[in-house]
Image (spheres, coloured by chain):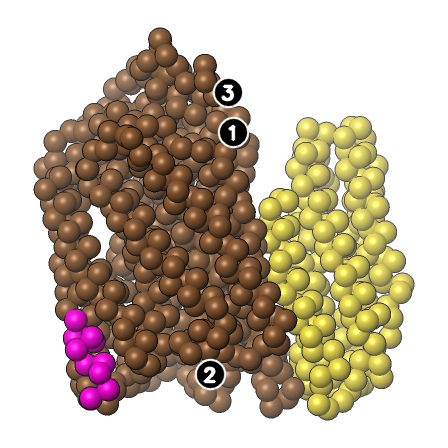
Amino acid sequence: MSTDSVTWPQAETSAHPFVDRLHEWVTTVDHKRLGILYIGYALVFLVIGGIEAGIIRIQLIRAHNDFVSPQVFNRMFTMHGTTMIFFVVMPLVFGFANYLIPLMIGARDMAFPRLNAFSFWLTAFGGLLLYFSLIGANGLYGAGNAPDVGWFAYAPLTSRTFSVGHSTDFWTLGLLVSGFGSIGTAINILATVLCMRCPGMSLGKMPLLAWLNLVMAGLVILAVSPLTAAQLMLLVDRYLGGHFFDTQAGGSAVIWMHFFWIFGHPEVYVLVIPAFAFASEIIPVFSRKAIFGYPVMVAATICIGFIGMSVWAHHMFTVGMSSNANTFFVLSTMAIAVPTGIKIFNWLATMWGGKIEFKTPMLFCIAFLFQFLIAGLTGIMLSVAPFNWQLGSSYFVVAHFHYVIVGAIMFATFGAFYYWFPKMSGKMYNETLGKLHFWLFLIGFHLTFDFMHIPGLLGMPRRIYTYEPGRGWDIWNLIVTIGVFFQALGIMVFVANLLWSYFKGKAAGSDPWDAWTLEWSTNSPPPVYNFASIPEVKSRRPLWDLKHPADPDWKYE
Amino acid sequence: MFVLITAEAAIFTIFVVAYLFYIGKSLTGPMPKDVLSVPIFYTICLLSSSLTIHLAAKALRRGSVRSFGILWFATIALGAAFLYGTATEWHRLIYHDGLTISTNLFGTTYYSLVGLHGFHVVVGLVALFIVMSLALLGNVRSEHAERVDVLSLYWHFVDAVWVVVFTVVYVLGR
């Protein structure tokens, strides 16, 4: 395999006029540029979704606050949820997968570059369609209107009777369009990982990130399609006068819940498995040890994929299912704790006895481990049906899933940002600012989401726009809102760090972390063709073999 | 293509589940057993088109472009015949029996499931037609056999789905 650096003429691109460069980015089919487009797009929506979260929290800072009207509050939590899931975390996941998978498996691009570009633009326009509802939803006579039916849009709220205007249609179409984009990208990832690996890289020698994204793509195929089908049914109901979810004509509102959560729960694993992937790449490098239990990690991931498909109705305990159904979903939900527990122990065992370097990516990954554990524990609590009857749709649930999505997924993703930023930009980030971001965000996160459990336990339901004073909720809501400001500060430091480092940071070199996977063998940023000659690998850590010819990995694997 | 088919299969599964769930739940008529007749002839058309496309792909691999063209045309004709069958059935249901998509639950589920399948037949026919035009222009040769195989895989899938839809709508649903 080759590490000889090919000097790529840097001056050539910067000499182009702006319009040409813009044209290059818009028409690109290069997996690295599309990956960066995905990530940049997600960051823009992260800020928008964050502002919506801020509005929600300011409204709830004290009892009887009237910062926004109840109608606006409903729109805010709907848009916040939809934006964060579909237009922040999904594009982040796909962006990193796009950027990293071909580099890690020694390929020159994804299997279908043009499908890749098509999928990105579908996702991008899906997001724009959702936000176009702000101007277009009421028809074109002035007052704007955003979807206000909650991010899981239960029937019959979405029927013509209760949702007049076009806001729900924009929601449906936005998700439908971006769903097609997701399916396209998933097809691409599966084909790339299965068909484009470099010589010598058998499935058992792939980096874990490629393995985990393979499972993620499989889940997208099986999970997003039911959502597409359900959205089509909703469109039939709203436009053609169908009766799928119309209880007046014998239809069923519960079947929408089933269809939505058949998508909705695997979706959680679609989002969290790539977070596992980041941790599985970052933790070994900063512990200076090979990952512990590679085959078990792969098996546990596939296991999570399978069990994850059969737990959806634990979102519906409060609906009143038969006791057989309840028992099944309680047990399957608890069973999923086993493979996730195996993963946590594997990461701990990787760190155990290692020479740990507490750089920013590693800090984020360690926080990810702790927070994911706690999120898992509250998950087990909520999987017990009687406990769930008590706390379903309370702030306890809100705290639980934000622990998963922010505490686990976003923390691991921030780790990934810092870890691969030198590769993507060719510049080193500022370590002090990185650590400042970490501590601000950590404090903000725990202020917000630790204390959010308590009003939930005290009976505060989710999605209320205000509450009575004197129920013991006031002080907790105040603390929760204060935490949001710390998080916002952290994000500002993060963005400032990215911008500053991109323009002023010092050159990173091709391998700043002394890491072991193929992406670090090429230049930073990698040339369009990735590798001057296609590498050939013999073990799971090809760069280790190269750096230590006397003691290569393939002797032991 | 296999992965796309998996995704498509998941979409159809949801529609089939909805159909099965809503069998007999309609509050007003017309009911399926009063208005549906089993379209045996058109089903045979569609299913035999699977055979012709298979033989066409095989002929192309052998290099006989001429028999490929004939069999390919037969596939399109059989697919179009199936669509014609669906069209006449829908015409009868709408104008004679007064069943539309908004009449009752049966109408909603029937038209969306059969319509979704019909949409896939149309997409397949468009793709088949494009290949046919390319073949008439003399641009399809034996080195394209692999691409034709991919398309024929899709067509087999559409046919296989019809077996499921047929069973659900015309056998179980009546």
The chain carrying label 1 is: A
Towards the viewer: A232 or A301: A301
Q: Percent from the top left, x then y, of residue A541?
A: 39, 24
The label shown at residue A200 is 3
C-beta proximity under 8 Å, tags 1 and 3: no
The quadrant of the picture occupied by the N terminus of chain B is top right
At a point 53% along the width and 26% down the height, the residue shown is A202
Q: Mark 3 to mark 2: distance in Å? A: 55 Å
Q: Colour of chain A?
A: brown
Residue A157 marker: 2
Residue A103 position by quadrant: top left
Q: Is residue A481 magenta?
A: no
Q: Quadrant of residue A399?
A: bottom left
Q: Earlier in the sequence, mark 2 or mark 1?
A: 2
Question: Are dots 3 and 2 in contact, CB under 8 Å?
Answer: no
Q: Nearer the viewer, residue A154 or A241?
A: A154
Name which residue type carries label 2: Leu
Chain letter tied to yellow = B
Q: Residues within 10 Å of mark 1 (few under 14, many from 20)?
A: some
Numbered disc 3: secondary structure? loop
Q: Position of residue A554 (x, y in %)?
A: 45, 17
